[in-house]
Amino acid sequence: MQAAREQFFNYLAKKKLKFTTQRALIFDVFWQVEEHISPEELYGLVKKKDPSIGQATVYRTLKLLSDSKIAREVDFGDGVTRYEPYFGQSHHDHLICKECGKSVEVVDERIEKLQEKLAAKHGFILSGHSMYLYGHCKECSKK
Amino acid sequence: MQAAREQFFNYLAKKKLKFTTQRALIFDVFWQVEEHISPEELYGLVKKKDPSIGQATVYRTLKLLSDSKIAREVDFGDGVTRYEPYFGQSHHDHLICKECGKSVEVVDERIEKLQEKLAAKHGFILSGHSMYLYGHCKECSKK
DNA sequence: TTTAAAATGATATTGAAAATCAATATTCTA
DNA sequence: TAGAATATTGATTTTCAATATCATTTTAAA
Ligand SMILES: [Mn+2]
Ligand SMILES: [Mn+2]
Ligand SMILES: [Zn+2]
Ligand SMILES: [Zn+2]
């Protein structure tokens, strides 16, 4: 079994939750997707493989994938929560074009370090952060 | 007239929008508030001064305050958009305790600079960013 | 197998935010 | 300052993502 699928399986076992055929299917479809996907979009894809699957199950499973660090929630500020593969990925933030919506994954270790220091300066222990950089991409700037 | 109120007034004039008594009242109440406030919370405060005011007007006016750079939207990730005074304030980001909900306003010029550089490296012209640092505050860490 | 616990899908519900619309208020023009 | 043109209002409905409910089914461990 692939490592990510196994981690999901183990997570469920540890929490005494069940590895159902629905969860397996949703995992598989999610894991093949490249972009950042919304629950509704994933539901659309999953339904093609099994029309009997319920929308609520997709929402519920995405939460589980998130809890088990297989997926990560991202919020591009358009009112829809999206999910992206997280397992095996290194941490990254997002650079988003406000005009065409394109997103680029970025990371700067110096920023990450400074965030830790900044939090420590205020007596906080950092557990995570969200950072979104908004602007205009090269193509959209030309126009 | 105070500078912020004047800027709001001028913004409306420039856009050929009207400076109504409702907008004036909502501005005044908002401007006295210290914390980050949600539309519903502000609606509660405004209604005390004028019970006839409509909820939709509060939502609409907050958007205008945001457009005119009097207010800024903040999203602490709890499903409610909040607003904070922006006019006359220097830019800052937020450090949020996941346990007690306390938020601290922070800024690090080195991070801001690095964000610009990071965007430029990918051909983007940065127009803004949102950064939220999540963790545990000193008090909550003790427990 | 049996059995207790968890999961499912259909459906209803929630809550924030936006849209609608007839009535009203504001601003501009003359 | 009257009146026309336009924007705004509050009540209400609508939207939409996300969650809750619940009777039925499935799962995993004994
Ligand atoms: Mn990503
Ligand atoms: Mn703030
Ligand atoms: Zn673009
Ligand atoms: Zn705290």
Image (spheres, coloured by chain):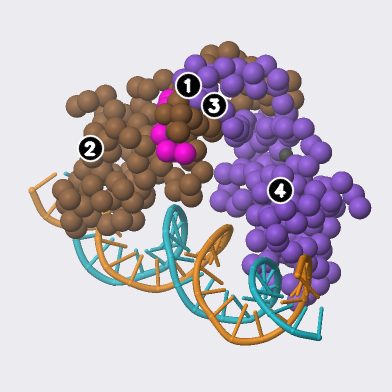
Chain colours: A purple, B brown, C cyan, D orange
Can you tell which mark lies on residue B65?
none
Indicate the amino acid at tag 4: Ser
In the picture, which quadrant includes the C terminus of chain A?
Answer: top right
Report whether B35 appears left or right of B113.
left
Of A76 and A51, nearer the camera is: A51
Can you tell which mark lies on residue A123?
1
Outermost residue toward the top in this view: B110
From the top left corner, tell me how far across and down residue B62 is, in percent. Answer: 36, 43
Can you tell which mark lies on residue A68?
4
Tags 3 and 1 touching, CB below 8 Å: no
- SS at mark 2 in the image: helix
Indicate the amino acid at tag 2: Asp
Indicate the amino acid at tag 1: Gly
Give the spatial CA distance, label 3 vs label 2. Answer: 37 Å
Give the spatial CA distance, label 2 vs label 1. Answer: 35 Å
Task: Judge the density around disc 3: few (<14), some (14-19), many (≥20) Cα neighbours within 10 Å.
Answer: many
Q: Nearer the viewer, mark 2 or mark 4?
A: 4
- Magenta part of the protein: which range? B99-105
